[in-house]
Image: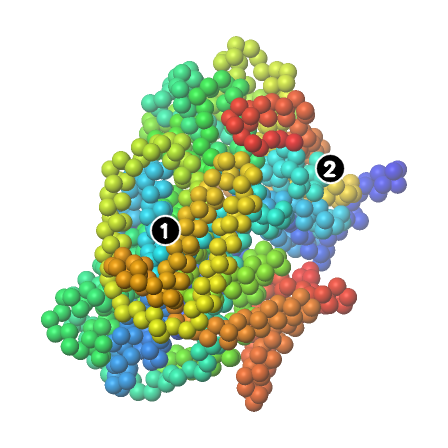
């Protein structure tokens, strides 16, 4: 108990509060940008946190995570586009409300529901920490192995548009994660004798590539924003009253959000829909749903903030991430030298409490800022994407370079970028890929460890049985809810591209088998088994796709209908996105030649002027402002700019990309 | 040559005023070597002639090889570059990793920070300081992160103590292994001094865990003394004698010294490049000695660095050579132990 209070006082030291506040601001901003969420936000922060003290870094990281699901309501209500995956259900009633001129009411109800949900989540987290020790002690290698595998299956099953594509994404992630040194024998796997691949691609590079780049490209593709800013604050008080009136709904949905969040692997993407359908099932008069019922905003918003507290439970005590952003949080733990597990509830308990308080305070800060400055913040949705995008790209490059100060990371970034873009466009699951990638080595080691200690007997241990039942039940319940949609295959164009794409995907498992088959069996058993499973899944998907394309009759029984649902994705304008992606490669080349500072200034100006010739004033101002921010950051944190080829011939000062000394 | 020794009488010409010293740490932030560097950093600035700025540059990757190779290639010999070394940097050299491009045994060490390893088991498995019950067991599981690291020495230690049932569980870090040990999944566990005090001592006091032995503290003359943190626990040589009925000597003693140098005596180190001049080395060593007399250092060192005194001076160089260059007989012994446990990895 003293520790709990000590952590609170520690957090109220000015430096801690400053970091928390900075994190919260960043979290609010990435929450507002449609598609960008906590994953991209954390990936941007991670390369800089390692120079900080652990407690500062934690405050900042939690600060980024907590308010994304608060501010994501702005685009959901004002534009009808979810700001993060967690606010998809908010759009259902939030957008109609705003069309009726009640945007302020919807926003204030959403923020206060978010606030209450977030604090509830932090509260549940702090209680569960007290009971964590016996749970950790009950989870041996076997139980942990099951937990990880089940988490992976659940992510795969629930985050994809199609069950099989989701699970296949998971396995592809596991395969990519197995690249590098084999943990048992130390053999290099799939490394082509490079030191870079021996280490495996850094997590932050994968996160930024898979999430940030596709979203930026997608935003550019969707062209101008159609949002209107919030003009009138009328109805602000009504929203608050709505939440007070529905206090019991907030409580139920927060509980639900916490529970679903705590199930490892389920995390963020489904919780808002679960809350929304819970609301529908427990309400008598459902006539207004989808047309602007305020309860349709309150339910998902309280649930999606509460889930953060719940999701931290498996993250902290088992190191098993519940969602994409928890993967990066765990990556941050590694950077600042914290190992999840028993230590988090014993020797590092102070840090755990610090996180809990940060979570609660970041929620309060986030909701407070959103309410207090709503009309100013809502203008963020008006900034044209062609201005946001080049700035984001420069930030991503700068962050990427500072992970290892390694040029290869840019190649990794752009490779995962193209994987992310295709995955997003063709309906494969990026969260499943990321979580598979992250958990790969853990799965491999746990399988050896379980085998050494228990053999197969671990399956009959009581905790294991409970886990298996729990997981099967969740999958059955949720897939039924998720996939009973009205899939119309005939709406989709470009099916052939999506079929060819599978042929490309097939290369990964095939080449993995080819390159590892000569190794010791303890080094190749894991990647080869994964590859075989992935191959069978991919071939199955290929067959279903071709059958769907040709409209073959055998697809018409119940089981095959299930496999067929969303087998194709209505892709955005893929060619357009490819074009924008190529401009990033151009930026990389400019970096090679000129070094980062000059390249960034050039890129921002060229990019903005290409879209709007008259915007030269803003393009120059923005590039100057960005450079000033980056200069002060790098001198503060001794970060280095990527220096280009001309640096070899001309002795440049550090702020133009020369050596830092 | 005589010119140089003349110059080294006073080190008035070694002055770092206005310069920046770059301390290359081949690990990520937050690790032990990084903490060691960060603790020393302010004292170094205070006592080096000219009070240079000291910045720590982390270059993690490739099992510390990336940063070490970077240092070899880029370090200037003028004292503005120092290297943060640790057991794994040494083991990379000693075990002949082909990616290693740094000539560690020629580096000029300034400060070594010794460590010590404690072994322990559950109280229901053995009496304190007694291996006999452990030796009777068919299966004795223990954690082993990877054989291509200092964990390799565990295999040799258990082999020499005749624990036939010893079987490594791969991929377990020392903290993950300790958790599994507390859950009762593995039988033998070990920790360095800092974690021993923080995590293991409380369990010993509760009666759940008993001490088995420590690696022992190797003096400059080769004598081995007990670890002050667990003064009742026998050292490895004592345990060896009790189990095998003969003194630790010959090839086994040589291997023990090599392992002890890498694992214990040079656990963490601060070094200058191989071609740093004697004056610069002396300036650094003088600064280190002044540092150890600093009242602030004295007040904080035990908590931050552990109870073992720093090793400064010529003997540090001898220890590094012993640790980084394993003799053929030592390599043969380690490889025999690896082969017995069906590892494909070999010391080169």
In this view, the mark in front (1 or 2): 1
Question: Would residue A229 appear left or right of B43 to someone viewing this image?
Answer: left
Determine which quarter of the picture holds residue A278.
bottom left
Crowding around mark 2 (Cα neighbors within 10 Å: few <14, some 14 to 19, many 20+) is some
Identify the chain of the residue marked 2, using the numbered disc in the image. Answer: B
Find the residue positioned furthest to the left.
A284
The residue wearing badge 1 is: A152
Q: Is residue A18 above or below residue A458?
A: below
Q: Which mark is residue A485?
A: none
Identify the chain of the residue marked 1, using the numbered disc in the image. Answer: A
Using the image as rendered, state which of residue B45 and residue A588 is in the foreground: A588
Q: Residue at x 18, y 67 (%)?
A: A279
Residue B265: x %, y % from top left: 60, 31
Using the image as rendered, state which of residue A506 and residue B332 is in the foreground: A506
Using the image as rendered, state which of residue A434 and residue A3 is in the foreground: A434
Q: Residue at x 54, y 74 (%)?
A: A580
Find the residue positioned furthest to the right.
B2
Q: Which mark is residue B106?
A: 2
Question: Would residue A93 appear left or right of B112 to someone viewing this image?
Answer: left
């Amino acid at each position: 108990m003293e520790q709990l209070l000590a952590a609170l006082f520690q957090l109220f030291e000015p430096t801690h509060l400053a970091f928390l506040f900075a994190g919260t601001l960043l979290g609010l901003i990435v929450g507002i940008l449609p598609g960008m969420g906590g994953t991209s936000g954390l990936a941007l922060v991670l390369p800089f946190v390692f120079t900080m003290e652990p407690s500062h870094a934690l405050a900042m990281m939690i600060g980024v995570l907590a308010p994304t699901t608060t501010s994501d309501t702005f685009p959901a209500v004002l534009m009808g586009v979810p700001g993060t995956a967690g606010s998809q259900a908010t759009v259902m009633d939030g957008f109609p409300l705003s069309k009726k001129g009640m945007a302020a009411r919807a926003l204030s109800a959403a923020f206060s529901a978010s606030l209450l949900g977030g604090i509830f989540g932090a509260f549940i987290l702090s209680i569960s920490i007290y009971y964590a020790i016996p749970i950790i002690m009950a989870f041996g290698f076997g139980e942990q192995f099951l937990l990880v595998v089940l988490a992976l299956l659940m992510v795969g099953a629930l985050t994809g548009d199609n069950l099989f594509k989701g699970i296949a994404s998971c396995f592809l992630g596991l395969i990519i994660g197995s690249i590098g040194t084999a943990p048992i024998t130390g053999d290099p796997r799939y490394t082509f004798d490079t030191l870079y691949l021996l280490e495996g691609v850094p997590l932050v590079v994968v996160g930024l590539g898979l999430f940030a780049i596709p979203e930026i490209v997608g935003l550019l593709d969707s062209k101008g924003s159609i949002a209107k800013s919030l003009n009138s604050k009328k109805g602000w008080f009504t929203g608050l009253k709505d939440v007070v009136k529905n206090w019991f709904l907030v409580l139920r949905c927060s509980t639900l959000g916490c529970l679903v969040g705590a199930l490892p692997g389920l995390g963020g993407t489904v919780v808002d829909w679960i809350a929304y359908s819970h609301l529908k099932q427990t309400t008598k008069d459902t006539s207004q749903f989808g047309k602007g019922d305020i309860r349709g905003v309150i339910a998902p918003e309280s649930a999606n903030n509460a889930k953060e507290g719940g999701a931290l439970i498996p993250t902290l005590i088992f190191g098993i991430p519940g969602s994409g952003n928890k993967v990066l949080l765990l990556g941050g733990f590694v950077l600042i030298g914290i190992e999840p597990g028993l230590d988090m509830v014993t020797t590092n308990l102070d840090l755990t409490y610090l996180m809990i308080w940060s979570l609660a305070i970041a929620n309060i800060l986030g909701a407070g800022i959103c309410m207090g400055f709503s009309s100013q913040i809502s203008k963020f949705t008006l900034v044209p994407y062609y201005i946001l995008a080049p700035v984001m790209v420069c930030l991503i490059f700068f962050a990427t370079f500072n992970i290892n100060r390694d040029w290869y990371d840019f190649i990794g970034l752009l490779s995962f970028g193209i994987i992310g873009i295709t995955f997003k466009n063709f309906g494969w699951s990026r969260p499943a890929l990321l979580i598979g990638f992250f958990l790969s080595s853990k799965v491999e080691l746990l399988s050896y460890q379980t085998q050494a200690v228990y053999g197969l007997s671990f399956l009959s241990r009581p905790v294991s049985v409970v886990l298996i039942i729990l997981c099967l039940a969740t999958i059955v319940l949720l897939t039924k809810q998720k996939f009973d949609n009205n899939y119309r295959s005939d709406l989709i164009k470009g099916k052939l591209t999506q079929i060819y794409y599978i042929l490309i995907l097939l290369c990964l498992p095939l080449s993995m088998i080819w390159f590892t088959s000569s190794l010791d069996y303890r080094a190749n058993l894991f990647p080869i088994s994964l590859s075989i499973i992935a191959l069978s899944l991919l071939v199955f998907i290929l067959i279903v796709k071709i059958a769907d394309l040709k409209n073959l009759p055998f697809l018409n029984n119940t089981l095959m209908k299930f496999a067929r649902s969303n087998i194709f994705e209505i892709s955005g304008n893929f060619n357009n996105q490819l074009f924008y992606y190529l401009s990033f490669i151009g930026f990389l080349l400019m970096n090679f030649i000129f070094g980062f500072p000059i390249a960034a200034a050039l890129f921002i100006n060229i990019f903005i002027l290409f879209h709007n010739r008259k915007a030269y004033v803003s393009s120059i101002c923005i590039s100057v402002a960005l450079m000033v921010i980056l200069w002060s950051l790098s001198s503060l944190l001794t970060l280095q700019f990527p220096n280009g080829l001309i640096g070899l011939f001309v002795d440049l000062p550090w702020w133009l990309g020369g050596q830092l000394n | 040559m005589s010119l140089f020794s003349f110059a080294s009488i006073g080190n008035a010409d070694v002055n770092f005023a206005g310069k920046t010293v770059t301390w290359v740490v081949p690990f990520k932030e937050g690790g032990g070597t990084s903490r060691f560097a960060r603790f020393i950093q302010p004292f170094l600035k205070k006592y080096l002639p000219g009070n240079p700025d000291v910045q720590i540059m982390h270059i993690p990757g490739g099992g510390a090889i990336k940063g070490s190779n970077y240092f070899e290639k880029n370090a200037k010999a003028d004292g503005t570059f120092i290297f943060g070394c640790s057991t794994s940097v040494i083991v990379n050299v000693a075990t002949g990793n082909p990616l290693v491009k740094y000539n560690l045994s020629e580096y000029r060490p300034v400060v070594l920070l010794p460590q010590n390893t404690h072994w322990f088991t559950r109280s229901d498995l053995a009496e304190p300081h007694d291996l006999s019950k452990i030796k009777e067991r068919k299966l004795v599981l223990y954690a082993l992160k990877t054989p291509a690291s200092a964990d390799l020495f565990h295999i040799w230690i258990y082999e020499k103590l005749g624990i036939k049932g010893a079987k490594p569980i791969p991929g377990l870090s020392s903290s993950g292994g300790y958790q599994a040990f507390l859950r009762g999944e593995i039988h033998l566990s070990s920790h360095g001094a800092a974690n021993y005090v923080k995590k293991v001592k409380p369990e010993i006091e509760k009666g759940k865990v008993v001490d088995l032995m420590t690696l022992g503290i190797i003096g400059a003359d080769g004598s081995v003394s007990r670890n002050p943190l667990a003064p009742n626990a026998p050292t490895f040589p004592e345990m060896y004698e009790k189990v095998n009925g003969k003194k630790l000597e010959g090839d086994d003693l040589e291997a023990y010294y090599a392992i002890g140098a890498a694992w214990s005596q040079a656990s963490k180190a601060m070094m200058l490049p191989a071609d740093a001049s004697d004056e610069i080395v002396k300036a650094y060593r003088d600064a280190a000695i002044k540092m150890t007399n600093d009242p602030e250092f004295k007040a904080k060192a035990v908590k931050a660095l552990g109870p073992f005194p720093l090793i400064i001076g010529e003997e540090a160089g001898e220890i590094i050579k012993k640790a980084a260059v394993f003799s053929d007989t030592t390599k043969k012994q380690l490889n025999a132990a690896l082969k017995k446990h069906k590892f494909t990895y070999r010391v080169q």
